[in-house]
Image (cartoon, rainbow, N blue to C red):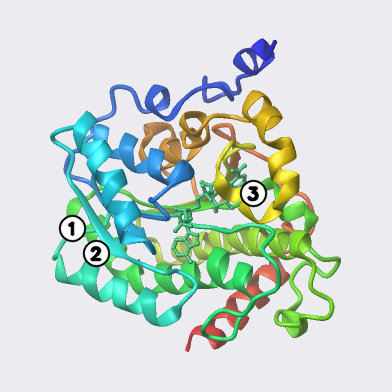
Amino acid sequence: MFGFLKRRSGPSGFSPSSTAEEVTAGIDGSGLVAIVTGGSGGIGAETCRVLALRGVHVVMGVRNTSAGELVKEEIVKKVPAARIEVLELDVSSMSSVRRFVDNFSALNLPLNILINNAGIAFAPFTLSEDGIELQFATNYLGHFLLTDLLLEKIKVTAKESGIEGRVVIVASDSYKHTYREGIRFDKINDESSYKSIPAYGQSKLANIFHANELSSRLKEEDVRVVVNSLHPGAVATNITRHLGFIKDILSPLAKLVLRSVEQGAATICYLALHPQVAGVTGKFFMDFNAAELKPPATDKELGKRLWDFSVDLIR
Ligand SMILES: NC(=O)c1ccc[n+]([C@@H]2O[C@H](COP(=O)([O-])OP(=O)(O)OC[C@H]3O[C@@H](n4cnc5c(N)ncnc54)[C@H](OP(=O)(O)O)[C@@H]3O)[C@@H](O)[C@H]2O)c1
């Protein structure tokens, strides 16, 4: 019935039904170190497994370390040679992000790949411990801070190893469903006009702006670090946890029509490891191919304004 998924393929040669294992087959990631946020479940856990399978030393940033340790145990059962660390990270909290980076630095590892994956969707209005709307804080701002704190390490690693550094930002096609203004700079924390779907879209639009603006800045510096964002497809995971009874009604159908986590992690692993991505930066990927962005994601001024706004928030 869903054979059409297998047929469509673009210049990458892979199709929407390709799995993370398939798109990284034959790639040797040994000697590389990657951080993956939100590795305790969903497509993040599968990303950790497949990177470890390819020999990458994986550092999982998870808010629930017991869940993270269980994922690690499962991976090590299947991949006995896997090198995996589990470090606590609540990406919605700036102090937790700073602690995570300190703990990572204490490991004395290089850093080749950063995968900003952790996320929540459609959450009711909540403020983070820093007083920032929770979807914006989790999906975007915490990752903006994390990337900022790790960037020097990624640049130094790329320079010393001669291997291109990669930052992979998990966004979503839902960026199109943001608020009318794109980013509501003056109403980020406004509860009275909050709507959970556009707020998710806003945070995912912010992910795309982050990738594109960071990519432009790195090009000016002439460092060998590429930054790309992506939509993983509609994947059967726990991301719909805030949809309540709607989730329960849709759940049996969802398993039939949505992608598996093995497929959902595929574009992430492709961007992290595949040689086809060498030198490719500032693109938004869907199904292994750079996709054309639609407004408001094409508004470069909005992206620059978001960057300055974010710098003010994290300082
Ligand atoms: N599934 C889809 O259809 C879809 C489509 C487009 C984009 N995406 C994006 O894909 C990414 C992964 O989502 P998923 O589908 O794999 O969802 P998921 O199964 O709900 O996994 C999300 C992961 O993020 C973690 N997380 C949430 N809040 C966190 C926090 N404050 N600090 C640290 N980790 C946190 C979760 O940890 P806990 O287990 O502790 O909650 C979990 O490990 C998200 O960025 C999402 O927006 C997904």
Which dot marks residue 160?
1
Q: Residue at x 47, y 67 (%)?
A: 143
Q: Residues within 10 Å of mark 2 (few under 14, many from 20)?
A: some
Residue position for label 2: 156
Q: Residue at x 16, y 60 (%)?
A: 109
Instruction: Locate residue 94: give its quadrant.
Output: bottom left
Q: Height in image: 30 above or below 2?
A: below
Q: Earlier in the sequence, mark 2 or mark 3?
A: 2
Mark 2 secondary-structure assignment? helix
Q: Is residue 34 visible?
A: no
Mark 1 secondary-structure assignment? helix
Which dot marks residue 240?
3
Left or right of 33 on screen, residue 45: right
Instruction: Locate residue 100: give its quadrant.
Output: bottom left
Contact between marks 1 and 2 (CB within 8 A): the answer is yes
The Cα–Cα distance between marks 1 and 3, rounded to whole angstroms, is: 42 Å
Q: Identify residue type, mark 2.
A: Val
Q: Height in image: 64 above or below 144?
A: above
Q: Residues within 10 Å of mark 1 (few under 14, many from 20)?
A: few
Q: Residues within 10 Å of mark 3 (few under 14, many from 20)?
A: some
Residue 93 percent across, percent down from the top left: 46, 77
Residue 128 percent across, percent down from the top left: 56, 79
Which quarter of the rendered picture does the N terminus lie within? top right
Left or right of 194 on screen, residue 86: left
| Number of the front mark, 2 or 3 | 3
